[in-house]
């Protein structure tokens, strides 16, 4: 019994913290951040810095957001709500994945009940909903309506996962998200009709049961074309849409042209194995002299407050934190998460003062040493 519990725990760890293929990108993500060293300044740092920034135009008190991650409840019971509550209290924004064990309405209620102004700015943390372009497009649009109604501040559209790169650990373990893990965002009013044959992927049997069919329906099956992104952006309006998972300079610029912002990401090393890192992608983008999206974020191995300085110095408005917060949740639920969030915030604020920046705009490439 003990052994089988351990085995399940290890499989969940492999799913959550492993990477795709040979895990080269997983290693490179951390290395790339480490390669950027910071130049301390002696005569200008003050601890009372203005840390206000924006995600897709929504004003935020801090340049940190929790990355959308599937089924946080695999790590701790009620994981999505714990993450929402801890983030909101600390002024950290949260992007809820479509793949959530708890319904988006409930997560929004928890987040909104706990958000409050942080630091000297009046801004509070924001709550975004992460969308996929699903096989049945109407389902994507239905999520937009639900999230608007529920009190979300904006949307993130993930464009780097039209196909899922095999994960060797999961294959070896025979891991799939367990059937008993509740698909909290399952559309409860969905009824297939003859006019929508693809809806047969989501028959009423799904209500509380066939999780695998829901997972299958989440994955889209065609190349994501710019017109559909523009259509999704229009449906999200007046709320912002931020496109997540762009790396090539042309794609970053295209995301900026189609939506309110872009997130440079290799999906936490879970998609193309051997992909460049967000650090590389930001360097390529700045060399390209293409037009910068109005809001630009990155992610991948961001774990320390000083990593946020690196991201901003590379030209971002902020960075998402994925596995580092997931690890804290896994380690000790709300208590550990609270500690991890407060530590990264403190590190960030002190690092900002030590590089001599008094606002996010003052964290420039001049704080980086590439030698
Ligand atoms: C277990 C896991 C599940 C994820 N699920 C999603 C998801 O549902 N949607 C999405 O856009 N990104 C997803 N991501 C990617 C994250 O949003 C983010 O890009 C990545 O984790 C950042 O890298 P880091 O984990 O090294 O910080 C997931 C990442 C992990 C680790």
Image: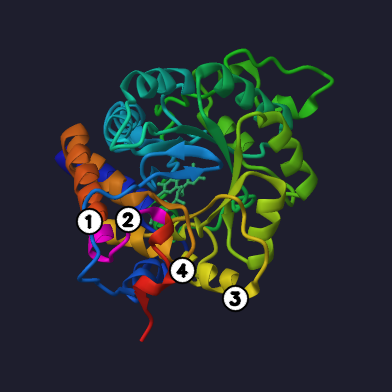
Q: Is residue 65 left or right of residue 192?
A: left
**Mark 4, residue position:** 279
Residue 71: x and y, percent?
40, 35
At horizontal 55% and vertical 33% (from top left) the residue drawn is 154
Q: Which residues are magenta?
A: 350-360
Q: Quadrant of residue 79?
A: top left
Whichever of callouts 1 and 4 sits on the residue coming sooner in the sequence is: 1
> Is 359 in the magenta?
yes
Residue 95: x and y, percent?
45, 37
- Confirm or deny contact between disc 2 and disc 1 (CB under 8 A): yes
Q: Quadrant of residue 1?
A: top left
For the residues marked 4 and 2, what is the alpha-carbon distance in whole angstroms?
23 Å
Element class at badge 1 = loop
- Above or below: residue 309 compared with residue 24: above
At horizontal 37% and vertical 65% (from top left) the residue drawn is 310
Query: From the viewer's perspective, is the residue at label 1 or at label 3 nearer?
Result: 1
At horizontal 37% and vertical 50% (from top left) the residue drawn is 321
Residue 22 at least partly seen: no
For the residues marked 2 and 1, what is the alpha-carbon distance in whole angstroms?
7 Å
Query: From the viewer's perspective, is the residue at label 1 or at label 4 nearer?
Result: 1
**Mark 1, residue position:** 46
**Mark 2, residue position:** 358
Whichever of callouts 4 and 2 sits on the residue coming sooner in the sequence is: 4
Task: Say which of 157 and 51 sits in front.
Answer: 51
For the residues marked 1 and 4, what is the alpha-carbon distance in whole angstroms?
27 Å
């Amino acid at each position: 019994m003990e052994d089988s519990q351990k085995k399940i725990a290890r499989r969940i760890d492999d799913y959550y913290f492993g990477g795709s293929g040979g895990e080269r990108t997983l290693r490179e993500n951390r290395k790339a951040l480490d390669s950027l060293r910071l130049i301390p300044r002696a005569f200008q740092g003050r601890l009372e810095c203005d840390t206000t920034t924006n995600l897709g135009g929504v004003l935020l008190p801090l340049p940190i957001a929790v990355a959308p991650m599937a089924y946080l409840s695999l790590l701790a019971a009620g994981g999505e709500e714990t993450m929402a509550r801890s983030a909101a209290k600390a002024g950290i924004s949260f992007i809820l994945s479509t793949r959530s064990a708890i319904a988006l309405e409930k997560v929004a209620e928890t987040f909104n009940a706990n958000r409050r102004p942080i630091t000297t700015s009046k801004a509070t943390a924001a709550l975004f909903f992460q969308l996929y372009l699903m096989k049945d497009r109407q389902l994507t649009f239905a999520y937009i309506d639900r999230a608007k109604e529920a009190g979300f501040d904006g949307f993130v559209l993930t464009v780097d996962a039209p196909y899922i790169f095999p994960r060797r650990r999961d294959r070896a373990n025979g891991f799939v998200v367990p059937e008993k893990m509740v698909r909290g965002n399952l559309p409860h009013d969905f009824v297939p009709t003859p006019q929508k044959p693809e809806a047969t992927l989501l028959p009423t049997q799904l209500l509380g049961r066939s999780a695998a069919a829901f997972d299958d329906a989440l994955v889209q099956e065609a190349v994501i074309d710019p017109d559909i992104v523009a259509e999704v952006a229009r449906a999200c309006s007046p709320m912002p849409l931020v496109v997540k998972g762009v790396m090539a300079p042309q794609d970053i610029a295209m995301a900026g042209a189609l939506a309110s912002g872009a997130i440079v990401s290799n999906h936490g090393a879970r998609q193309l194995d051997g992909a460049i890192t967000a650090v590389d992608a930001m360097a390529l983008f700045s060399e390209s002299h293409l037009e910068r999206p109005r809001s630009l974020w990155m992610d991948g191995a961001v774990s320390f407050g000083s990593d946020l300085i690196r991201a901003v110095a590379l030209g971002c408005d902020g960075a998402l934190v994925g596995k580092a917060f997931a690890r804290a949740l896994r380690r000790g639920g709300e208590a550990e998460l609270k500690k991890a969030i407060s530590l990264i915030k403190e590190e960030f604020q002190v690092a900002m003062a030590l590089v001599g920046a008094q606002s996010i705009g003052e964290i420039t490439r001049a704080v980086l040493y590439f030698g």
